[in-house]
Every structure is written in C-alpha cells, then in structure tokens.
Amino acid sequence: MSQNQLLFLQVEKKRKLLIRISRILVLLGFLAIWEITARCGLIDVFFYSCPTRIARCFLEMTKNNQLFMHIGVSLYETILSFFIIMIGSVLVASLLWRFQTMSSVVEPVFVLLNSLPKSALAPLIIVWLGTGIRTIVIAGISVAIFGCIINLYTCFKNTDSEKQKLIRILGGKKRHIFFMVVLPAARETILSNMKVNIGLALVGVMIGEFLAARQGLGYLIIYASQVFKLDWLILCILILCFIAVCLYSLIQMIERRLSMRI
Amino acid sequence: MLLLECNDLSFSYHTHTGEISVIKSVSFRIHKGEFVSIVGPSGCGKSTLLGLLTGILSPEEGSIKIHYKQKGTQSFYGYMLQQDHLLEWYDIWDNVCLGPKINHCLDNACKEYLHTLLTRYQLDTFAHKKPSQLSGGMRQRAALIRTLAMKPELLYLDEPFSALDYQSRLNAADDIGKIIQKEGKTAVLVTHDIGEAISLSSRVLVLSKRPATIVKEFVLPFQNTGLSSLEIRNLPEFSTYFNLIWKELNTT
C-alpha cells in the first residue's frame, strides 16, 4: 500500500471516529441539559419529566416484568402485521399481474383504500371484531398493505418486456415469466417496501392499541396520559423509538445480506 | 434442402388512432445451411417480420410452412434478441440452462452439451460468474449458447450486436458467425447494418420502407470460402456489394 493510500485511510478513520464521538456527545449533552433544567426548576418535572426519573421508572417497571410484557405484545403484533403485509401484498400483486384485465377493474378500489386515512377505519374494525390482538393486527395491516400492493403491482407491470419475451421464446409460460423474471427483478422494490412497511406496521399497531387494547405500549401510553403519569409516557415513547430503529436496522441487515449474495 | 417457406405474409398493427400496415406480401424460402440476412431501413418492420416467423405474432394474411425438422431438435427455431438479456440474478450457467429448464429437458446429455459449448467458446471459466462480470462479446456468446441449448434447426438473429460498441461488434459478429458455421446451423439475421449482412451471410434480402416488402435479393459468393467475416470486409467485392445494397436501400 502506498504512503498516500495509508494517509487517506487514516484521515477517513479519524473522520468516522469524530462523527461517532460527536453523536454520543450530542446525546449526552441533550440528557444533561434536560436533567439540569429540570433540577433547577426551569422546566416542570411533572410535565416534562427528567432522565433520572425515567430511568427510575424503567427500573421499577422491569421489576415485575410488566414493561417487557407490554413491549412483547406490541412487538409481536407489529411483526405479525408486517409479515402479513409483505406476504399478502406480494400475493395480491402477483394475482393482479397475472390477471391484467381484472386488475384494471379493481385498481380504483386500491387507489381509494390507499388514500383513505386508515385511522378512520379503526373504530369500525373494533365494532366488527371487538378488542384484542386480532383487531390491532388488522389495524396494523390496513395502514400499509394497500400502498404496498400498488407499489409492487406497478413494479411487476414495468418489468422489462424484452426479458419476458425471451422466456416466451424459450417456451416459458406466465408462471416461468413470473418466477424467472418478474419476481427476481422486483427484489429491490420488495426490500425497500419492507423498510417502509415495518415502520408503518408499528404506526398501525399504535393506532389500534390506542383504541382497543388492554396490553401493549400504545395502551400504556394512553393509560399513562389519562392518569398523568408522564414519566411512563415519555419512557414508552423512548422505547418506541428504540424498537423502530431496531426493526429498521434488522431489515437493513437482511437487505445487505441479500445484496451480497446477488 | 428446403427448411422454411413464407408466402405472402402481411401484418398490420392496430392502435386506437388507426391501423399501420407494417409487412406487405413478403415471400421467401430458407434452405438448410444458409445464412440469410434481411436488411432494411430503420423502423421498416424487421423485428415484426421476425415476430411473425417465430410465432409471437400471427400473420393477418399469408402462411409460414416448416418443411423439415430433424429428430432430436427440441425447438425448431432459436431467437437472439437485440440485447443479450442475460438475467442478472442468475449466473452464466443458469442463464444458458434457461431453455432446457423451462422445457424440463435438462438431462445429463444436455448438461454435457452445454459444457462442451461453454468450453469450446471460452466461457467455461465464467460459468459461475454473474453476467455483469462479463464483457459485451462474452455476453453475446453466452446468449448464443443459451439459444443453442435447445438445439434449434434455425436461428433468428434480431440485430444481436446493435448494443455493442464498434470494435466489440465486429469481433462478436465474427465470433457468432464462426459458431453458427461450426455448429452447422441455418440462420436468419435481421439488421440495418449492410456491412454486417454482407460479411456474414450467403444471401441478402432487401426490404423497402414501411409497409415492408422484399425489393431485391443478392446472392453472395463469400460463404464456404473459409474467410472470416473480418477478412471478407477487406475484399474488393465487399465494397461492390455494399454499394449495390446501399443504392437499393436508398431508392426504395
């Protein structure tokens, strides 16, 4: 390796380290300012809480495993919704691709359902299905699935027609075209939709839990706000941030694995 | 030996704004072992003609008769598209196996045949590489092997080199020409490149502008002289034929 290359690598390494340290400092600074202003009485701890109170609250709630139960329920609902969204929309989009005339007929329905604010549907679902995990999972699904179907169908439809022709020339049927060309060509779109949908599923689950749950972080947030336990509330929001980041990173990791293989 | 006969083929495209007549009473015959080029101005309907020949489109008038089909051929014709269209998500081996796999005839004999072809045309070391790791010429060879995998009697080539730069284009044309001759295949090449047509084929059919019909036929003396297509390009007769065809294309 040449001297210049080494120098370049060193500079890059330093830059990365600097960024990492700065990020930690920003976080610590924010927590410190929050804590100090709360202690000095500049902000009201009752409304705004402070890091130490939240930490204490976290420890208390973990003692009886109550917190983990709520986290577990929300996670379970989110992941279940996510899987149903992805599998469902790939299935529906492939059916739409297979039966193009039918899809022209039903396309307005999907556009309509996609543009409808799904939170408006939640009360209806509760009346139909009652409260419980089933309702919440359906709320989670409804937020993302229609958009995802439209995205995937558009992607399937725009697959290179010459490549489809190639399979036809080689004697392939629609089935071969789908599995050899359309689906592999859509893998990047599917992955990017997965990244969006894991976040949307969490949004849907929260909407569901706000309205119709006895368990889960959404329920906890609503309960805490009603009894003015703002320590709980802020703790729940922080946990939600953490979950969202973790789920997103998980998908990103899967994406990286796949792109390495392809 | 007569392989294929087309009589009075006609075809039009139908759109909402009207009808476009693309092919009008085209007739020709292809004999076994021939390399026939069909040249015509851009957009005259050359690809449409191939569409008719391969059965992707069906002619509105006229007929296509297949006179001879050898035993053991899995499909009568093979088709090379304007680009190689190797599927990026498969490696070269899976790409060349595509046809047999679709038709459930990927047996050991077929695999062996494909291995021989890959080795013969210097692609054996690339069998497990992705298409993006190959040069343009190699990709063309792989695409040709994919076409040959079905042991076709007749090869249709639809401007198969048009996506390549000039130098790789000459080399690829030379390669493909040699391979087709070596494997004893009959071929129909559709192109707008007169030089390519002359250097590769034994017969050239000239198409008119739309609606396309055959205006002239040239029988070339170069095939079976043992000259490569690059050498043919340097012959004095090459420019004679070039000028003749050029004139014919411009007067139609």
Image (spheres, coloured by chain):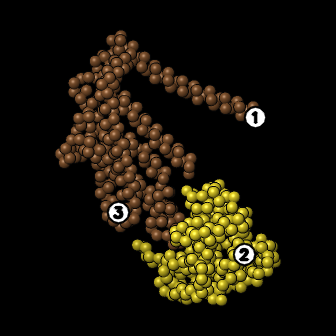
Chain colours: A brown, B yellow
Q: Chain of mark 3?
A: A
- Inspect this view and state whether residue A99 appears: yes
- Which mark lies nearer to you, 2 or 3? 2
Please state the horizontal and vertical placement of residue B53, each as a whole percent of the image.
Answer: 55, 80
Q: Quadrant of residue A76?
A: top left
Please state the horizontal and vertical placement of residue B241, each as a whole percent of the image.
Answer: 74, 80
Q: Is residue B168 left or right of residue B94?
A: right
Query: Element type at marker 2?
Result: helix
- Which mark lies nearer to you, 1 or 2? 2
- Which mark lies nearer to you, 3 or 1? 1
Query: Element type at marker 1?
Result: loop
- Residue at mark 1: A2
- How many C-alpha atoms fall within 10 Å of the one at disc 3: few (<14), some, or many (≥20)? some
- Inspect this view and state whether residue B169 appears: no
Q: Quadrant of residue B32?
A: bottom right
State the residue at coordinates (28%, 23%): A230
Please state the horizontal and vertical placement of residue A126, each as a whole percent of the image.
Answer: 20, 44
- Residue at mark 2: B182
State the residue at coordinates (79%, 80%): B225
Q: CA distance from mark 2 to mark 3?
A: 49 Å
Which mark is on residue B237? none
Q: Is residue B156 left or right of residue B13?
A: right
Q: Quadrant of residue B106?
A: bottom right
- Please name the amino acid that badge 2 sits on: Lys
- The residue closer to the viewer here, A109 or A177, is A177
Q: CA distance from mark 1 to mark 2?
A: 50 Å
Q: Is residue B139 left or right of residue A250?
A: right
Q: Chain of mark 1?
A: A
- Residue at mark 3: A103
Q: Chain of mark 2?
A: B
